[in-house]
Amino acid sequence: MTRYISTFLLLGVISATISYLGCTTKPSKQVAEEKITISKVTVPFRPDEQPFCVSLTEDETFIVYQSPRSDGHGALDLWFSRFEDGKWSEPYNAGPNINSSSNEADGKFSHDGKSMVFVRSDDFSKSTELYISYLEGGSWTKAAPIGAPVSLPDTKEFGANFSHDGTRLYFSSDREGGEGGMDHYYSERSGQTWGEPVNLGPGINTEGNENDLTISLDEKTIVFGTKKSDSIEGSTDLYFSQLTEGSWSPIQNLGSEINSPGNDSCAWFGHNGTSLYFNSDWDYDLGKIGESRLVWKASNPKGF
């Protein structure tokens, strides 16, 4: 079953009222066009897959995610699936040019699916390093470290993802000089190099940890997962901040219309501008905690 949410947007802030199929009268065409739907991503994941932190190409036919499957190259690998003939293919390993005996995570595509940035680490609690690979002639190139000034020794960088035009790289880092533990940053591309990271400021960054951000198509809304005093039942919720007159607004909880009593995290705005993907151990179809953390897609015909 797909969950439907009636929505309106005021300065980009999402308000929603939940209704379920079969529980309301048939909506008019005008109302139906204002619906956001939340549905399960139907990649045929294995029971032990634990898929996390997805990214898709703009046409939504190619997906990457991280998984601790036992048949990978390391403890945590990146995996692919393609949407062909009306269904998702069996997932397959991204291969040795990307995966290693270490841990690979947070794979994020450029809009055309020809570049992918990801995190590699032997121990995520100590440090990570950002890598990039390119799709050339149908194969992914040997991943290379992005390096300084974006990815620094003895620091942690997570959730790196490209702006839609590929000129900026947004990511989280615990480097010195931030507002707290993990802060949000961006770096500008100049040719094939990345410039000095810019902290997004105290409006969006706090004394806590802000991780796994995703940036909207117009680069004016950021969503990420964290735990705050207003998190539902003390779980991890999705929060957002908006760029207004050059500054990022203080973060706000997306609310119970999207966040669940479970843990909702690792959000990712689709490059098509109408999709928001996220992980949750709450089963939106059944209305209860599920047996595993699943991947969900919120679709908004009016765009996010």
Image (cartoon, rainbow, N blue to C red):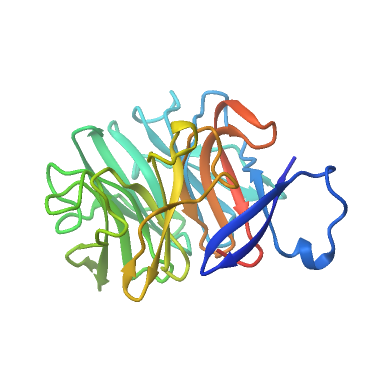
How far across and down, in percent of the image, does residue 138 sit?
A: 46, 56
How far across and down, in percent of the image, does residue 190 sit?
A: 24, 73
The residue positioned 54% from the left and 33% from the top of the image is: 261
Up/down of 109 relative to 54, above or below: below
- In the depicted view, which residue is nearer to us: 303 or 41? 303
Direction from residue 82 to residue 210 in the image, left or right: left
Q: Quadrant of the N terminus?
A: top right
| Residue 150: quadrant of the picture | bottom left
Up/down of 96 relative to 242, above or below: above
- In the depicted view, which residue is nearer to us: 287 or 103? 287
Most extreme residue toward the right is: 25
Direction from residue 14 to residue 224 in the image, left or right: left
The residue positioned 49% from the left and 30% from the top of the image is: 50
Q: Quadrant of the C terminus?
A: bottom right
Most extreme residue toward the front is: 229
How far across and down, in percent of the image, does residue 170 sit?
A: 32, 59
Up/down of 171 relative to 129, above or below: below
